[in-house]
Image (cartoon, rainbow, N blue to C red):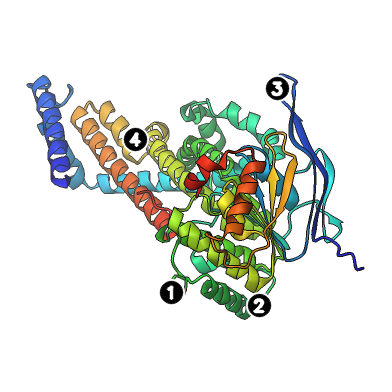
Amino acid sequence: MQGRKIFLGLVGLSLFLLIWHLVTLGNGRTDVPGPWLTLAGLIELATGGVLWRYIIASVFRVMWGFTLAVLVGVPVGLAIGWSRWFRELVNPLVQGLRPISPIAWLPIAVLVFGGMTWWEPSDLSAIFLIFLASIFPIITAATSAVEGIDVKFLRVATNLEVSGAKVLFQVILPAAMPQILTGLRLALGIAWVVLVAAEMLGVQSGLGFQINDSRNNLRYDLVVAAMVVISVIGMFLDGVMARIENSALSRRGTAKR
Amino acid sequence: MIVETPKIEFRDIDLHFTAEDGSVIQVLDSVNLNIREGEFVCIVGPSGCGKSTLLNIACGFLKPSSGQVLIDEVPVVRPNRRRVFIFQDNSVFPWLTVSQNIGFGLADVSPIEKEKTVQRYIEMIGLSGFEHAYPRELSGGMKQRVEIARALASGPDILFMDEPLGALDWLTRLKMRADLVDIWRQEKKTILFVTHDVEESVQLADRVVVLSDRPAAIRAVVDVNLPRPRNLDDPEYLRIRDEIFDWMGLDHHGIAAKSV
């Protein structure tokens, strides 16, 4: 089974590479590059020295934006799901902000964070955009996770007169955890996707900057090479989240089977 | 003559609600019932008749439209740990181990005492060696034992059991009935036990309360004065069982053989 899965995956990938190669046959660096040019570009990026610095810069921004979104989004989502009062207070605001693309915030972010001196301003606006991109899926996941808790578990707590922090940490959070973790994984995926756009303006490093910069130099081979790097790191981050998700769940005896 | 005050007293319990089309749906119709301390009472009735609803009202999860439940002469307002509800579909926390589950309601005792209590109930339900197991590693019967142990550990004097053996296979159910009677005798609890299984009620109860179809009213209260463990071939056992079938309006000659 495992062998077939890997084999078919490789076949699909090879077919894609073949078609890619054929339709870009004869293209140079200023056209859409083929696989070979892209590979050469990748090697150039990797040996040129900036790639590793850019990867670190990008991952750093995503981790900050995402972590802040978790720290704010999970409690807010839990509270919306738990308290009708809080839901009525906050939900219209959340629903109103949600449809605004994080990219639309870019000018505002640059305006607000541009004057800051205590940290690299462009970093802050990128982090802010990633925060915005990931917080709504997290809030939504946490809210529906709480709303979906089987009422019998809450009744047990009421019946045994267990309340406060113990209910939060021994009933509500663990009951909501599987859905929250799924939401976090989704949110991290979105954060990574938004990163490139967030790094298009103002910043002088990162994979998004690399794409923008290479385009300005008409080096489309490097554009596609950076896309490949983004794909690989995105898959890696998702893999890490999937691992966290599974190990946290199996520790609680509720792993997906 | 000394008049014993009832442990649980249902006084004119009435429950109805208004459906969306404006019609009033009557669920419980003036239920009056007294239960003595230490008594094992089963409530039987057709499915969907309101047995569970009555139990939820007694525990304080649900308010009747009118009437009152009194426990030790005090009206029930909300649930508390002196009377614990046991759910039809197991409500053991899947993310806690067996001993964490059993100790869940023990907040106000010292760690040593908590440990002792948990250990005592683990032994009582025969799950020694499974202290650190998660519920997913247990069978349905074992999980239901953990739920009963968790209820007992918090020291209630009443157990409200809502078809607690309904999800178990036939053999496990028989074994659990015997164990439940042992626990009841050992711990001297008052048990109100809802079931749709007439055989089960006669095997367990001191008295069987037969409810009518919706709106549920008490149709009969049948005494089961038989020694325990109950002999299922005893003519008196069979007579009581058939009497309950009769009260439920069932032709037991065809059904009894298939019922268990």
Q: Which residue is mark 1?
A: B129
- Image position of A71 (left or right of B68): left
Q: Picture quarter containing residue A197?
A: top left
Determine whether label 2 and label 4 are within 8 Å by CB. Answer: no
Q: CA distance from mark 2 to mark 4?
A: 57 Å
Q: Which residue is mark 2?
A: B110
Q: CA distance from mark 3 to mark 1?
A: 52 Å
Q: Which residue is mark 4?
A: A208
Amino acid under label 2?
Ser
Marks 2 and 4: same chain? no
Amino acid under label 1?
Gly
- Image position of B45 (left or right of A226): right
Amino acid under label 4?
Gly
Earlier residue among tags 3 and 1: 3
Q: CA distance from mark 2 to mark 3?
A: 51 Å
Question: Could you say whether the residue bearing mark 3 is in a helix, strand or loop?
Answer: loop
- Image position of B7 (left or right of A255): right
Question: Could you say whether the residue bearing mark 2 is in a helix, strand or loop?
Answer: loop
Q: Residues within 10 Å of mark 4 (few under 14, many from 20)?
A: many
Give the percent coordinates (x, y) of residue A189: 38, 39
The answer, for residue A188, to whether it is visible in the render is yes
Give the percent coordinates (x, y) of residue A176: 53, 48
Q: CA distance from mark 1 to mark 2?
A: 23 Å
